[in-house]
Image (cartoon, grey):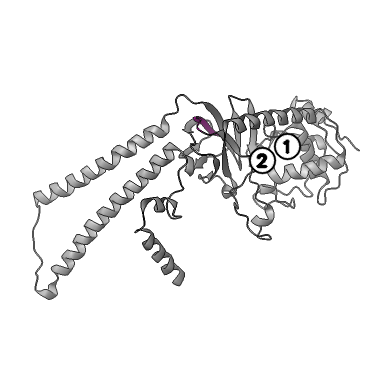
Amino acid sequence: MKSMWKRAGTVGAALVVSHPALAEYAYNLQKPASEVAQHVFQLHNLIMMVCLGIFVVVFGTMFYSLFKHRKSVGHKAAHFHENTTVEVVWTVIPFIILMGMAYPAAKVVIDMKDTTNPDLTVKITGYQWKWNYDYLNDGISFYSNLSTPREQINGTAAKGEHYLLEVDEPMVVPVGKRVRLLITANDVLHSWWVPALGAKQDAIPGFIRDSWFKADKIGTYRGQCVELCGKDHGFMPIVVEVVSEEDYKAWVAKKKGNAQTAAADNSKTFETAELVERGEKVYQANCAACHQANGMGLPGAFPAINGSKVATGPIADHIAVVLNGRPGTAMASFAGQLSDADIAAVVTYQRNAWDNKMGDAAQPAAIAAARGGAAEAAAPAAQ
């Protein structure tokens, strides 16, 4: 209770400081980093001031009337009905107030929906529980996963500065460029939201909705999925890194180089130990949220991999499940999300981790064959 009153006092003190200080205060919106976000921030403050004014007038009048016209000082209740003047006044005044609020709000909403003349277009697809970014102008595609260590989530390690708001692959955009977002979802409803950039749009399976932003400042901006999308809804952060145009070009070149490296990996033959080491990283980033780091799953929701018939059965069937998923369940296809080398690695890891000691391995060539429908070519590659 003491801490609650202390916090209330802090809020009260903040109300008497200058407007710029309020913009920095933790109880307000995030500091805007784009023109649209600035308009949203100003609109928010305007509406709050209007609401505060209404509150003061209505409750001030009510408490004044109760105090000045109370029975203990000799006042008697008046009896009257249908005062036309009063009814007109309390209808016209709220109408004027609403119209005064609607005009600036409509301008902001229209501005938020104007996605014309973009400098850069990025298609964003929501998955349980990650984001896929396709840079349509630059031919780059990657997935962005939560990177907060499991030890922090499980409470066995201290929480980091950006707990549950950090990813392995952030979205990178150049400062001062108009970025158009084409937003959809692969499975259930998601919602892409970065408040400091003034961008929020629901991601709906089967539909493509658009939004945009133009960051005015170099920096890192964080957001989250704000649609209840399943048990790990809170583990689906968004990180946007705004960089200079030169740094953006360097990042694009690096990503394209990584793509070439991944293509080279897909034609490589790995040792089993290499696949297991790589597969553990792929598993932690893509599978541990559902099946848990120990492979035991969540009873009634997600099956265990440790000791499962899939992980201890024919490797071709195991590959097929990872590639194609299981229709009607939460097990999605990873054919479009992971490279041949990554799928080979995670299959090998699952078959040789925990109590699964199969001693076999999948190679990228087997995954490529399975993609082409030749699952029989995905026979065990013992090493």
- Please give left or right for residue 367 compared with residue 107 in the image: right
Helix, strand or loop at label 1? It is: helix
Do the numbered discs 1 and 2 sit on residues whose CB atoms are within 8 Å?
yes
Q: Residue at x 61, y 35 (%)?
A: 132
Magenta residues (range): 176-186
Quadrant location of the C terminus? top right
Quadrant location of the N terminus? bottom left
> Mark 2 belongs to which amino acid?
Met
Helix, strand or loop at label 2? It is: loop
Identify residue for label 1: 321
- Does 338 sit above or below residue 288? above
Q: Residue at x 69, y 56 (%)?
A: 151
Q: How many marks?
A: 2
- Residue 331: percent from left, percent from top: 66, 40
Q: Which mark is residue 1?
A: none
Distance Cα–Cα, label 1 vs label 2 = 8 Å
The stretch drawn in magenta includes residue 182: yes
Residue 325 falls in image quadrant = top right
Query: Which residue lies most toward the right here?
Result: 383
Magenta region, main secondary structure: strand
Q: Earlier in the sequence, mark 1 or mark 2?
A: 1
Q: Which of 337/330 is in front?
A: 337
Identify residue for label 2: 331
> Mark 1 belongs to which amino acid?
Val
- Residue 102: percent from left, percent from top: 29, 39
